[in-house]
Image (tube, grey):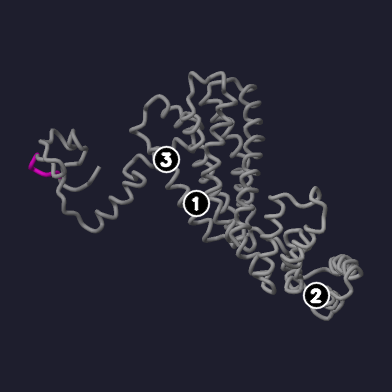
Amino acid sequence: MSHRPERKEKNCLNCGTTVQGTYCHVCGQENVEPKETFFGMVSHFFNDITHFDGKFFTTLKDLLFKPGFLSAEYMRGRRMSYLNPIRMYVFTSAIFFLIFFSVTDPGSTFKLVDDGPLSKAGRDSILQDIQSKLEKDLGDLNLQKQVELLKDTSKPLSEIDLLPYSTVVSTFGYDYKSREEYDSVQEARPSDERDGWLKGLWNKRAIRINDKYKSEKSVSLTNFSNTLLHKLPYLLFISLPFFALILKLLYVRKRKEYYFADHGIFSVHHYILSFILLLFIFFWDKMNAITGWAIWNILLAITIIAWPIYLFLAMKRFYRQNGFKTFIKFFLLNMAGFIILLLLFVFFFLFSVFQL
């Protein structure tokens, strides 16, 4: 609802209908003065997104302290008093990822190679592995350079320091130095022993990445981490219908009572709650890093423990089953959800590799 004064005229400025009350009964436009201040325009913008005029805080309070309540209210048709779950999902996910990307370093989030100095034991282990490879290919200058660096104990050395001299695609697990070498090896093998289409595609892509970055392997790892990190919003969004599908299968005997959309609304509310709890976790962790006070670790532990407890209580309240049945389905939901997230992560991992 706008805070601008109501017009004395009763003709709707949008469709011309005579207005009976504050809102036009035909198009729904509020019959208020069209002129507004800049502050009023900004306030209207935030009200449209979050309904800060009451709905947002009412919804937030009930979401945090009444597990499953909002989903049950939505299912009963009581929706005008609360913020639309899709709108709230968009808002909370946007805030979450805005904060997440501002405080997260892609290079450290998905660290594939340790950039810290190698210990003596670490040096010896890598040196032994490289020397065994060198015995098979005595003329490999890159292996010789790595051996030289590893034997020089006068200065610290990290795994990233060795990457510029690793011309094989060892990052992805395939020891081919060029596309020509790979094709030659494949042609020399019997047809039934050659790589399949998918493995061949992976090998060729890995060789291309190796050739593209060459002595800038650390750059390729940073780019990969950044690409994968920015796929997380899509991963979570795509996982939503899968989460709802798992719930539908778990409560298949209630299919006449709960439609897929009902499971979807429950899933959306749980994801919103998850975003909020993750923001609290980030905050507690940050405050602990700044102050070192034990209270932040306690709050962090409480928030993490509250997460599964909340889901259990929400399921029990929304689906109206006893504690034992709910616990069994809660356990199965988490197991299946973990597998789905893992499969989606692998998919986005591969997708990120092919975007390098």
Secondary structure beneath disc 2?
helix
Count of labels shown? 3
Q: Please give the residue where the numbered disc 2 appears in the rendered image.
A: 142
Q: Earlier in the sequence, mark 3 or mark 2?
A: 3
Query: Which of 24/225 is in front?
Result: 225
Please name which of the two marks, 1 or 2, marks the residue nearer to the observer: 2
| Residue at the image point whose x is 53% and y is 58% from the top | 101
Work out whether residue 290 can be spotted: no
| Residue at the image point whose x is 13% and y is 44% from the top | 13
| Quarter of the picture holding the N terminus | top left
Q: Earlier in the sequence, mark 1 or mark 2?
A: 1
- Label 1 to label 2: alpha-carbon separation: 44 Å
Q: Please give the residue where the numbered disc 3 appears in the rendered image.
A: 86
Amino acid found under the numbered disc labelled 2: Asn
* Residue 4, x across and y down, in percent: 19, 48
Secondary structure beneath disc 1?
helix
Is 231 above or below relative to 221?
A: above
Please name which of the two marks, 3 or 2, marks the residue nearer to the observer: 2
Work out whether residue 16 can be spotted: yes
Is 240 above or below relative to 213?
A: above
* Residue 44, x across and y down, in percent: 28, 50
Query: Which of 203/61 is in front?
Result: 203
Q: Please give the residue where the numbered disc 1 appears in the rendered image.
A: 96
Q: Is residue 290 left or right of residue 256?
A: right
Q: Give the magenta range.
A: 6-10
Secondary structure beneath disc 3?
helix
Q: Quadrant of residue 85?
A: top left
Which disc number belongs to residue 192?
none
| Quarter of the picture holding the C terminus | bottom right
How many residues crowd around disc 2 within 10 Å: few (fewer than 14), some, or many (20 or more)? some
How many residues crowd around disc 1 within 10 Å: few (fewer than 14), some, or many (20 or more)? some
